[in-house]
Amino acid sequence: MKAIAKKADLPESVDDLRIDSVGAPQIEGLGGPPGEATDESYQGERVEERSVGGQVATLLGKPLRYITNQMDGSLKTLGRFLELAFHSVAYLVTDLIRLRHPWRETINQAWFVVSVTAIPALLVSVPFGVIVAVQVGSIIQQVGATSISGAAGGLGVIRQGAPIVAALLLGGAAGSAVSTDLGARSIREEVDALRVMGIDPVQRLVTPRLAAMLFVAPVLCVFIIFMGLAAGYLINVGFQSGTPGSYISSFASFATVSDVGVALIKTWLFGLVVILVACQRGLEAKGGARGVADAVNAAVVIGVVSVFVLNLVITQIVSILMPTRVG
């Protein structure tokens, strides 16, 4: 019996038997109860599945958190923009009523905007009018409708060309300059010094620039319209065998005063959006020269994108409420 027990690793006596906590007998030299190893392996598999599932959830959660944070930051920026717009317009109206508006600063800012946008407007509006006249004239000549070349080119310049060119110049030249100026003041803590002295930076810095932009933007649009139409007229009469009478008569048949009014209103709104975006980015600039550069970049990009979106909305509304008429 002892030899058989040794071969089978069985206990030689009852004392060699151990009872585990579950009540199943365990024999020395052998493992636990038959189901214990299976339970441990099953639990290990479940732990491994949980770890893999946690890794997958973490990987999927990172883009979601990033998108959520970006949306939250964008909404906060939009809220600050609307707050700045409300306060600046309120200060402008209040100062005009109380006769306390800083006209000298407004005139200086208006002259500054004109000085940085006049020559670029001339250099952009003339080629733009030439391109529109050449493209429209070539198509109209192919279909045999040369008598309406003035209307097609003129309406293109008035309705879309002049407001967009003015907005790009105001955002790229004037907006970047304003953002740079206010950003430099912010990193030099001049804005904080105004707050310490009890002066609202919006009333002191933003309101004069807003008034200057509201005055300069329509003037710039009229200048671009004039130069674009003059360039288109010269191309049509001088190089496309058109006559001055047909060009002017077709333009007068299609274009109306309301088209010019809509163009001026669009440019006015574009200038309002561009200058407020530039002021907001400049006042929120932080981190030295790198922060000013980032503020200028953001002011130009956000201002131009906002202008294009606003132009799309206004164009759709105008096309529904004011359809093009002939005669």
Image (cartoon, rainbow, N blue to C red):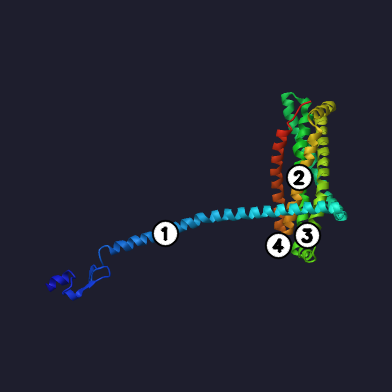
- Classify 10 Å Cα crowding around label 1: few (below 14), some (14-19), many (20 and above): few
Q: CA distance from mark 4 to mark 3?
A: 16 Å
In this rendering, the count of numbered labels is: 4
Q: Which residue is at 71% across, 37% downward?
A: 317
Q: Which residue is at 81% across, 47% downward?
A: 214
Q: CA distance from mark 2 to mark 3?
A: 23 Å
Q: On the picture, is 48 further left or further right than 17? A: right
Q: On the picture, is 28 further left or further right than 312? A: left
Q: What residue did someone put label 2 on?
A: 269
Q: What residue did someone put label 3 on?
A: 201
Q: Are marks 2 and 4 in contact (CB under 8 Å)?
A: no
Residue 163, can we see it?
Answer: yes
- Classify 10 Å Cα crowding around label 2: few (below 14), some (14-19), many (20 and above): some
**Which callout, 2 or 3, points at the residue further toward the start of the chain?**
3
**Which callout, 1 or 4, points at the residue further toward the start of the chain?**
1
Q: Which residue is at 70% across, 57% downward?
A: 294
Q: Position of residue 98 (x, y in %)?
A: 86, 54
Which quarter of the rendering shows the C terminus? top right
Identify the residue at the far left of this view: 1
Compared to residue 64, the image places residue 251 above or below, namely: above
Q: What residue did someone put label 1 on?
A: 50
Q: What residue did someone put label 4 on?
A: 286
Q: Position of residue 106 (x, y in %)?
A: 85, 53
